[in-house]
Image: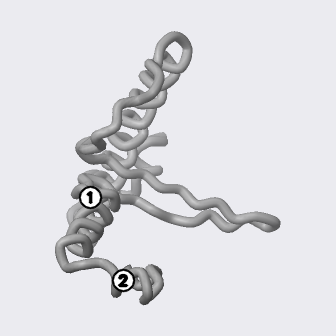
């Protein structure tokens, strides 16, 4: 509204201003809550990339102008499966690391002696 020239705003009555504000408010997309909102930057020697991963409910009102079919649909399914596998492996690795560090901090030994002694008994 601040970008509208003052001469134009003075010609509008209160109802017209409220209608313009309502249209602007409707036109600006509202962000929906995300389950996962991961954003980071990868700096390389000559360039910089950003990665954004957002997972949440799709609340967009617009339908796609085209139907995804054929190879693109197959590639989307494969990408989703690989993403799920990668996330589960990452969560598993972090969980195992935390459990190992917790075990080490508490001084719990699962094997007598060093692991290499147990594995390579002579």
Residue 94 sits in which quadrant? Answer: bottom left
Q: Quadrant of the N terminus?
A: bottom left
Q: Nearer the viewer, residue 104 or 93?
A: 93
Q: Is residue 5 above or below residue 53?
A: below
Q: Is residue 40 above or below residue 58?
A: below
Q: Is residue 61 above or below residue 26?
A: above
Gap between marks 1 and 2 measured at Cα: 20 Å
The circle drawn on residue 105 is none
Q: Nearer the viewer, residue 92 or 43?
A: 43
Q: Is residue 37 left or right of residue 26?
A: right
Residue where numbered disc 2 is placed: 9
Q: Is residue 102 above or below residue 80?
A: below
Residue 90: % across, % down: 38, 48
Residue 66: % across, % down: 47, 22
Q: Nearer the viewer, residue 9 or 90?
A: 9
Q: Is residue 78 left or right of residue 106?
A: right
Residue where numbered disc 1 is placed: 26
Circle 1 sits in a helix, a strand or a loop, which is it? helix
Residue 81: % across, % down: 40, 27
């Amino acid at each position: 509204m601040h970008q509208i020239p003052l001469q134009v705003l003075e010609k509008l009555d209160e109802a017209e201003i409220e209608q313009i504000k309502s249209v602007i408010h409707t036109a600006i997309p509202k962000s929906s809550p995300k389950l996962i909102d991961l954003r980071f930057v990868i700096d390389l020697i000559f360039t910089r990339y950003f990665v954004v991963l957002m997972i949440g409910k799709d609340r967009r009102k617009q339908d796609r102008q085209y139907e995804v079919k054929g190879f693109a649909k197959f590639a989307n399914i494969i990408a989703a499966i690989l993403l799920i596998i990668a996330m589960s492996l990452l969560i598993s690795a972090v969980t195992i690391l935390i459990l190992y560090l917790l075990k080490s901090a508490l001084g719990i030994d699962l094997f007598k002696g060093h692991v290499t002694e147990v594995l390579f008994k002579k």
